[in-house]
Image (spheres, grey):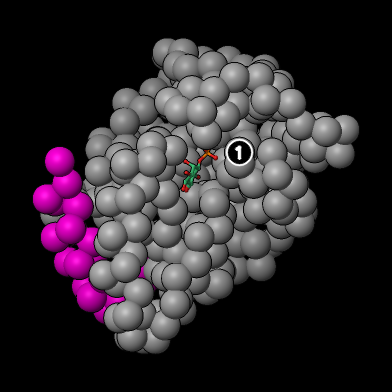
Amino acid sequence: MPSNAELRDIALTVARRAADLAYLRRSEGVEIAASKSSLTDIVTRADREVEQLVREAIAASRPRDGFLGEESGGGEGTSGLTWVVDPIDGTVNYFYGIPAYAVSIAVVEGDPDPATWRTIAGAVVNPASGEAFTASAGGGARLNGRELHVNRDVPLELALVGTGFGYDARKRERQAAFVAQLIGQVRDVRRIGAASLDLCSVAAGRLDAYFERGLNPWDHAAGALLAREAGALVGGLGAGPEGEDLLVAAPPGLYEQLHPLADAFYSEWR
Ligand code: LIP
């Protein structure tokens, strides 16, 4: 079994190659290939092409590992490791040319289920900025090699909080209702548009906290490890792990202030 650092380096090498392709395709003009859960939930030809590059590169390097990708689905392995990949997280930003999208690659141990997996390593690369966020379990979190640490001792009323919204209009209205409830209790809110970059922003101290409901496993697999390795607590509904029902990421202290508010609201979600 390779070391956590070796798996991290594989994730970074592949993520950088994928980011170069995504950036090239963006410069050539982006075509929508299809829509998924709603007309606004788009997939571009680049999403599919980038995921194919990642899948082939990982298969060449780690042929016995499993794979779970946003566009091409799952593939079981025999090694006990699975690579969880969002080829272009922040697809709408990518389509509009907003420079806040990322290739997100994580490798997890156990079933590819956020409720039970153990994340070993991850890389999140923003093709537009060239920023490469990396982490390995127990090895810390880095941005272009520089160690990252969350902001400490920020009270809720001074917290800059990131969040996001789903592709279903009715769900967005409910999510916005919670933001309306929260916004008077915090410094301000930011909606960057890519969960992986939101979580890296918490790790880098660019956000004090982040929460969102409705994320897919590939949206947060790498970013959640980055946030944890930089000192954040990450969790979901109740005392459970992060998942589709809720993800909250914040340093200790702020987490205990923010999580109960999000938990109370989203526990009532029907
Ligand atoms: C995106 C997430 C983001 C969320 C968006 C979208 P995608 O993922 O990263 O946090 O608010 O609605 O789901 O669809 O760009 O891979």
* Residue at image location 66% in from the left, 67% down from the top: 146
* Residue at image location 77% in from the left, 51% down from the top: 128
Which quarter of the rendering shows the C terminus? top left
Query: Is 252 included in the stretch rendered in magenta?
Result: yes
User: Based on the displayed image, in which of its 4 quarters is residue 182 positioned?
Assistant: bottom left
Residue wearing tag 1: 91
Mark 1 closeness class: few <14, some 14–19, many ≥20 residues within 10 Å: many
* Residue at image location 45% in from the left, 70% down from the top: 189
Q: Position of residue 65 (x, y in %)?
A: 50, 20
Q: Along the horizontal axis of the image, is 181 left or right of 210?
A: left
User: Based on the displayed image, in which of its 4 quarters is residue 204 positioned?
Assistant: bottom right
Check disc 1 and give the amino acid type.
Thr
* Residue at image location 54% in from the left, 44% down from the top: 122
**Residue 193, placed above or below residue 24:** below
Q: Which residues are drawn in magenta? A: 248-270
**Residue 118, placed above or below residue 130:** above
Q: From this viewpoint, is residue 121 visible?
A: no
Q: Along the horizontal axis of the image, is 50 left or right of 244?
A: right
Report whether the residue tagged 1 is closer than 8 Å to ligand 1.
yes
Q: Nearer the viewer, residue 26 or 80?
A: 26
Q: Position of residue 201 (x, y in %)?
A: 54, 64
